[in-house]
Amino acid sequence: MKISNSRFLSIVMQVLAWLAFAFSFLLYTPSEIMGVYQIWVKQILFTCMLAAAYYFNSELLIPKLLLKGKGLYYFMSIIGILAIILFLNSIADSELHVHRALEEAFHHTGPPKPHKEGGGRGPFMDIFTIAIVAVILGISTSVTTIQKWQVDKLHHQQLREEKTASELAFLKAQINPHFFFNTLNNIYALTYEDADTSRKAIHQLSRMMRYLLYDTKQEHTRLSDEINFLKDYIDLMKLRLTDRVAIDFSYPASIPSVMVAPMLFLPYIENAFKHGTSVNEQSEILIAISQNENTLMLHVKNDIIANKSVAPEEYGGIGLENTRRRLDLLYPGKYQLSFSESPTSKEYNVYLSIDLL
């Protein structure tokens, strides 16, 4: 079973931390007893007990009790750990004869130190041990809860990203079939009127499909590619329109090298053709893409044809809610979208600006 580099590094760091903790006590140990082996053995045993308490609390008590709202059971378990360590520490002192060894060490370097009969530890040593254990358990609880919070935060972020990707895929799937449905209907109508023109339309449509299938798999595409796609779309729409419809499509002469969401502008342009053209009336469609520093702007204007006026909530064929939702997912807090319908001038305008930073 292979261990990842990060996991291996974590293990090494923890081992070094425990070694540093164990030897830190010896820094304050009098030189007279540095040669007493019982002190070294006792320190190793005590460190092992602390490490066992640390990981028992981290791996079992916190996830099974504390994080599941069983605070009383957790507190009782901590008290039990303290009692067990005090008991084991007392047995270690007794079996290793630590107090007798200390007495002999000090006896050779000075007057003997007074001690209780039977080698009792004394209340100070018990309080000191409890304090050390409490500190270790407190560190264990703090580190584990912080790690749990970080893992949960990362997990929620991943879920949000997965949800966002799913919704984007769903919204894009709504746009593409809608567009192809209308376009195929247009080509079908052309086959009865002009076979050569319909073949040209099929070629343009195949080029557009290639763009959608292979160039828009990523979340963003180059603005130049998106503009070329829109040019193909507009040319395809022109095939079924008469000279009564004037189309003005403008974009920067030097297209900036920026990335945008694929097919982001299409619903608004498609709506202009759907609701702003007529075989009997003069009409005009204006489509303008521009950039001002880091802001990308789209303006779509179409004439309001009688009996073809569209309510804002029906805008774009797939609905205003979906177009806004896609913008919310792709450019949260970085876009402005507005619609205006003027009965007097009989114009419908769409304004979209996106902050690319």
Image (tube, rainbow, N blue to C red):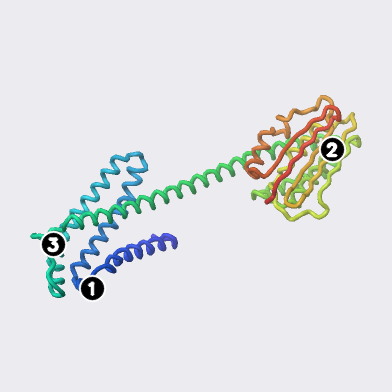
Label 1: which secondary element: helix
Q: Position of residue 72 (x, y in %)?
A: 29, 40
User: Mark 1 belongs to which amino acid?
Assistant: Ser
Q: Secondary structure at mark 3?
A: helix
The mark closer to the camera, 2 or 1, is 1
Residue kind at label 3, given as amino acid type: Glu
Q: Of marks 3 and 1, which one's residue comes earlier in the chain?
A: 1
Task: Give the crowd class for mark 1: few <14, some 14-19, many >=20 residues within 10 Å.
Answer: few
The residue pinned by badge 2 equals 285
Please report contact status of discs 3 and 1: CB closer than 8 Å, yes or no: no
40 lies left or right of 298: left
Q: What residue is disc 3 on?
A: 95
Amino acid at circle 2:
Ile
Residue 224 x/y as whole percent: 76, 52
**Quarter location, residue 239:** top right
| Numbered disc in front, either 3 or 1 | 1
The disc placed on residue 344 is none
Q: How many marks?
A: 3
What residue is pinned by disc 1?
31
Kindly report the distance in space between the C-alpha atoms of the residues bearing marks 3 and 1. 23 Å
